[in-house]
Amino acid sequence: MQTPDPGTPGPEFAAWLSTRLLAAGYDLSARGGGRSRFAADTGISASSVTRLLNGRGTPDASLLAKIAPVLGVTLTELLVRAGVVHRDEIARAVDPQPSAHAMSPQQAALQLGIESPTAVALFVSMVETMQKQEAQRRADSEERRMEP
């Protein structure tokens, strides 16, 4: 089955979900009770289950996070199957390309929510000390490698 494009889960996801539910023992017939039982097992509304099985709307990550353990699949797999993200985006998130511009310790502090001038100065000092130690470690390692 082809992976849906982000934002277009539609009938492909609905068919995949139906197949998974049937395989897991959920009776999806009109009086089978499988939809209600699945809703109860996942903690999502019965109307959400119906929308998913009818291929209407794009489920959000929090809804898929409730479904994944019940179906025995990873959240990543559900995000891709539901068209929330594309498999390539997952790969980039797992193995991002290094930035052309390195982040400064000051920028890192701000990104981490460190705002107090004293705390930023301490953070920057600690990072710079670790960077110097790492540079020395690499130099020592290179020197040992060059020894006969």
Image (cartoon, rainbow, N blue to C red):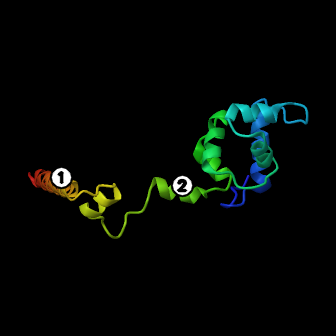
Q: Secondary structure at mark 1?
A: helix
Res 15 visible: no
Question: What's the amino acid at mark 1?
Answer: Met
- Residue 78 in view here: yes
Residue at x 22% of width, y 57% of height: 120
Find the residue positioned furthest to the bottom: 100
The answer to the question of whether label 1 and label 2 lie on touching residues, with beta carbons closer than 8 A, is no
Where disc 2 sits, the SS reads: helix
Q: Nearer the viewer, residue 30 or 146?
A: 30
Residue 90's tag is 2
Q: Position of residue 42 (x, y in %)?
A: 68, 35
Eye-nearest disc, 1 or 2: 1
Report the side of 133 relative to 111 (left or right): left
* Res. 64 image quadrant: top right
Q: Is residue 15 left or right of residue 88?
A: right
Residue indicated by mark 1? 126
Where, by quadrant of the figure, is residue 143 drawn?
Answer: bottom left
Q: CA distance from mark 1 to mark 2?
A: 33 Å
The answer to whether 116 appears left or right of 91 in the picture is left
Q: Say above or below: 63 vs 39.
A: below
Residue lying farthest front? 116
Which amino acid is tagged 2?
Ile
Q: Is 86 on the left or on the right of 46, as rendered?
A: left
Where does residue 90 sit, x and y in percent of width and height? 54, 55
Question: How far from the left and from the top, in percent, is residue 147?
Answer: 9, 52
Q: How many dots with numbers?
A: 2
Q: Is residue 102 above or below residue 43?
A: below
Which is nearer the eye, 107 or 4? 107
Give above or below for 10 relative to 71: below
